Image (cartoon, rainbow, N blue to C red):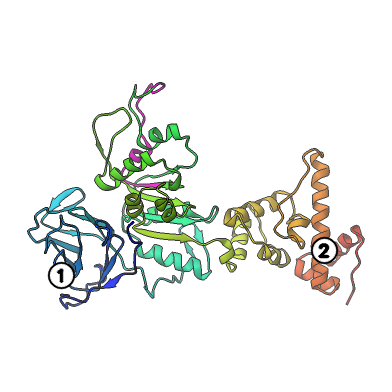
Amino acid sequence: MARAPTEPEPLTERLTDVAPSPLDGPESCVIHVLTGHANDQGRSYTLQRGTALIGTAQGCDVCVSDPKVSRRHLEVSLTPQGVALRDLGSTNGTRYLGAPITEAVVPLGSQVVLGRTVLAILPVLAGDTQLISDSTQYGELVGASPAMRQLFGVLQRLERTRISVLIQGDTGTGKELVARALHEQGPNKEGPFVVVDCGAIPQELAESEIFGHVRGAFTGALNDRVGAVEQAHGGSLFLDEIGELPLELQTRLLRVLDRHELKRVGENRYRNVDVRILAATRRDLVAEVKAQRFREDLYYRLAVVTLRTPPLQERGEDIVLLAQRFAREQGATADLPEPLLRMLRQHTWPGNVRELKNSVARLLALGTLSLTNEVLGSSVSQALEVDPSVPYKQAREELLDRFELAYLDALMARNNGVVAAAAREAQVSRKHLTELLQKHGRRGKSE
């Protein structure tokens, strides 16, 4: 079993000391071994400036064990234009984008093949002190918490690259929004952004949905079909719940990543495709690889960079920010009252941002800022409970009564029973609050 990726190791030998590159060129990069000999796979090396030598000889800066790699195989240099590669007359050559090269300048995010070894040339991420963004929004993602600002910082570093990214996180944490942001800030942003939910496609249809088919390929194939990979040509393909993809299709996806080509179901020829692959999963893919339910080589090709979308429970600072934003999107003209916001902050939100968004929409749709007694009271994590056998009007009135009573009790307790103070905090008139108290048999104090 190959070792898991390690922290980048500094290149200390044979680095030519040169002036740092201009701002439009890379000042550093990480050389990451995606696949190759078991001794090498998952290792990373940081090149800060100058030139690095790759080969099997002991004196190389990146020393690999692949017998198909020459002793002094490839030279890698940082230039203002990008990362320069120079094959040093190797026996089996160096390949980039499927073609042999002697010399080439490639951008960060590129993959290079030496023998059976695949190297990824990446921006520096690990240990970077500038990963915390000053922004509280990135694309459609919103958050002021340290966890989100760190995510934004990594996304900013990935701009203008075509790196394959694996996004890990719980349901409702915004994995698709991260993928969309990567696409919209990437070099292929003018191309399509195609989404495939691998967990929602019946297994017998998955191959056709993703790779397409030709007429007559199987019963019911009356016309040619363009699959999702071809639909994403020139853009990005987002494979949500990639861990659900059947093993036999993982092999076909590997060819798209390796050779940039695919074959439709029932077709004999390969078609060239130019597509960036972004993937997401709730599963622990490392554990899936160990259980032989997910291909190890595909994992390393997808997880060139791995991002984690934090659950809302780790983003306490963002709950109010998101709730107010969702309320405005639903047409609310005033901010949500502070007592309600405090109760939202107490909730554990197992459904994460999606649950919060749906909850705010439900509150506003009911005609008042109403959560049920179960949600607003001591049992904050309870879900909305209704009886569909009761007529709608009656059920709605009963629900609002439960909300009003729970809200009033919590509000008056916070304000020591003083009506004027409670009215100010709830942002309602003193008269209206007095009427609500009388309606529910509650009394308040004038001072």
Give, as a three-letter code, the residue at label 2.
Leu
Task: Name the image quarter holding the N terminus.
Answer: bottom left
- The residue positioned 49% from the left and 65% from the top of the image is 148
Q: Tell me how far mark 1 sits from mark 2, CA to CA.
A: 75 Å
Residue named by callout 2: 408
* Image location of residue 414, percent across then percent down: 79, 72
Give, as a three-letter code, the residue at label 1.
Gln
Which SS class for mark 2?
helix
Mark in the foreground, 1 or 2: 1
| Stretch in magenta | 219-238
* Image location of residue 96, percent across then percent down: 19, 53
* Image location of residue 18, percent across then percent down: 17, 77
- Report which quarter residue 166 is drawn in: bottom left
Residue named by callout 1: 58
203 part of magenta stretch: no
Q: Is residue 71 above or below residue 257?
A: below
For marks 1 and 2 on the same chain, the one whose residue lies earlier in the sequence: 1
Q: In the figure, is residue 314 to the left or right of 201?
A: right
- The residue positioned 13% from the left and 67% from the top of the image is 57
Q: Nearer the viewer, residue 424 or 114?
A: 114
Mark 1–mark 2 CB contact (< 8 Å): no
- Report which quarter residue 375 is drawn in: bottom right
- Report which quarter residue 21 is drawn in: bottom left
Q: Residues within 10 Å of mark 2 (few under 14, many from 20)?
A: many
234 part of magenta stretch: yes
- Is any part of residue 80 visible from this angle? no
* Image location of residue 183, percent across then percent down: 38, 53
